[in-house]
Image: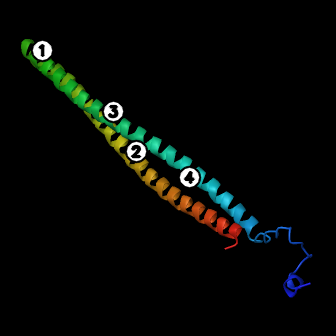
Amino acid sequence: MTDAVAARPGPRRGPHEVESPPPPDPLLPGVRRLGALAGRRAMLAEAALSRAKRASDEAERALADAERALIDCVADVAARRTALREACQAESGGELALRRWRQKDQREIDRIPPARQGVADCRSACDAAQLALAEAAARHRRLASRREKFSLLEEQLRDGA
């Protein structure tokens, strides 16, 4: 028996036997669990990012719709006021007709502020959705990076580096 064969630890092996791979690193199961947890968190963050994108898109559409509704409302009020003014000028009721015209005119003008408030509400909702989207994107980037770090660490431990 040669010194090299005698110096090997473990049972004696013949020349035809393949040497078994070294035992896995004892940290590997824990790293795998942490990596799996990081992967699940990254998937949840990706789903949250998708929901935030969808909410942001919906908020932008709602804002555009509200702005169009405001423009339509202002145009409608202008057209109705013009029609009211012409009707009042054609009418010969005097002071009573003028008072009725002013009341109808004021009712038309009073339709505009709620539409403006709707646009302001939609704009603030859109801003909030954009902020939530930015936060979700940052969280997703952070958790995806963490998942990548754990997968690299697991690979290094598995390879025995």
Mark 4, secondary structure of its residue = helix
Q: Are marks 2 and 3 in contact (CB under 8 Å)?
A: no
Give me the C-alpha separation between circle 4 and circle 2. 22 Å
Other residues around mark 1 within 10 Å, as few (<14) / some (14–19) / many (≥20): few
Amino acid carrying mark 4 in the image: Ala
| x, y percent for residue 3 | 87, 87
Amino acid carrying mark 1 in the image: Ala
User: Which residue is at a point 63% across and 56% down the rendered structure image?
Assistant: 39
Mark 4 or mark 3: which is in front? Answer: 4
| Residue that numbered label 2 is attached to | 125
Other residues around mark 2 within 10 Å, as few (<14) / some (14–19) / many (≥20): some
Give the quadrant of residue 56.
top left
Looking at the image, is mark 4 or mark 3 earlier in the sequence? 4
109 with respect to 11 (left or right): left
| Residue that numbered label 4 is attached to | 45
User: Which residue is at a point 38% across and 49% down the rendered structure image?
Assistant: 127
Looking at the image, is mark 1 or mark 2 earlier in the sequence? 1
Amino acid carrying mark 3 in the image: Asp
Residue 148 in view, yes or no: yes
| x, y percent for residue 108 | 23, 26
| Residue that numbered label 3 is attached to | 65
